[in-house]
């Protein structure tokens, strides 16, 4: 924790970049629904920079909100084929870029280092999964 304070003390005062969208049937959601039905999948559906929380479920919630995917059923369908991938660009505000990428492609790139690994080292705690 001392390392965290040295590196990042006093830099967590920025406001959240998460944008709320009131229309759950947005054009983006319709485009993503069409993409899920398409035979040729995009490797990446979305990318957003958002705050890390120490919990993958909360991070996914933040990322979905930030890109404007509010429909819960659509989110569940997306996660059947895609995974939120953390880039390795965590900054002093505990923000990182998350990409919604095709799971089968992501699995082929393992092992890799991402912002969760950096978070665990800096914060000296284990990042929690969806089930924790």
Image (cartoon, grey):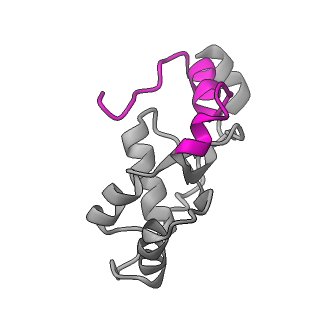
- The reply to whether residue 94 is in sight is no
Q: Is residue 77 above or below residue 80?
A: below
Q: Is residue 9 magenta?
A: no
Q: Which of 112 and 105 is in front in this view?
A: 105
Q: In this view, does 45 lie above or below 111?
A: below
> Residue at the spot x=56%, y=22% of the render?
120
Residue 7 place in picture, x, y as percent: 72, 27
Residue 124 place in picture, x, y as percent: 55, 15
Which image quarter is the C terminus in?
A: top left
Residue 78 place in picture, x, y as percent: 41, 58
Q: Which of 14 and 33 is in front in this view?
A: 33
Image position of 82 (left or right of 88): left
Q: Quadrant of residue 131?
A: top left
> Residue at the spot x=41%, y=76% of the render?
21
Q: Is residue 22 above or below residue 88?
A: below
**Magenta stretch?**
104-132
Tally the numbered discs.
0
Q: Which of 108 and 8 is in front in this view?
A: 108
Residue 13 place in picture, x, y as percent: 59, 49
Image position of 91 (left or right of 55): right
> Residue at the spot x=57%, y=65% of the render?
40
Q: Is residue 106 magenta?
A: yes
- The reply to whether residue 98 is in sight is yes
> Residue at the spot x=34%, y=82% of the render?
25
Which image quarter is the N terminus in?
A: top right
């Amino acid at each position: 924790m001392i390392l965290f304070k040295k590196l990042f003390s006093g830099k967590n005062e920025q406001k959240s970049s998460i944008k709320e969208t009131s229309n759950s049937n947005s054009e983006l959601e319709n485009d993503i629904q069409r993409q899920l039905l398409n035979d040729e999948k995009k490797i990446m559906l979305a990318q957003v920079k958002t705050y890390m929380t120490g919990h993958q479920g909360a991070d996914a919630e933040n990322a979905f909100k930030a890109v404007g995917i509010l429909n819960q059923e659509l989110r569940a369908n997306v996660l059947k084929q895609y995974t939120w991938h953390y880039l390795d660009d965590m900054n002093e505000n505990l923000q990182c870029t998350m990409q919604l990428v095709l799971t089968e492609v992501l699995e082929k790139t393992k092992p890799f280092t991402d912002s969760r690994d950096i978070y665990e080292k800096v914060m000296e705690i284990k990042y929690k999964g969806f089930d924790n």
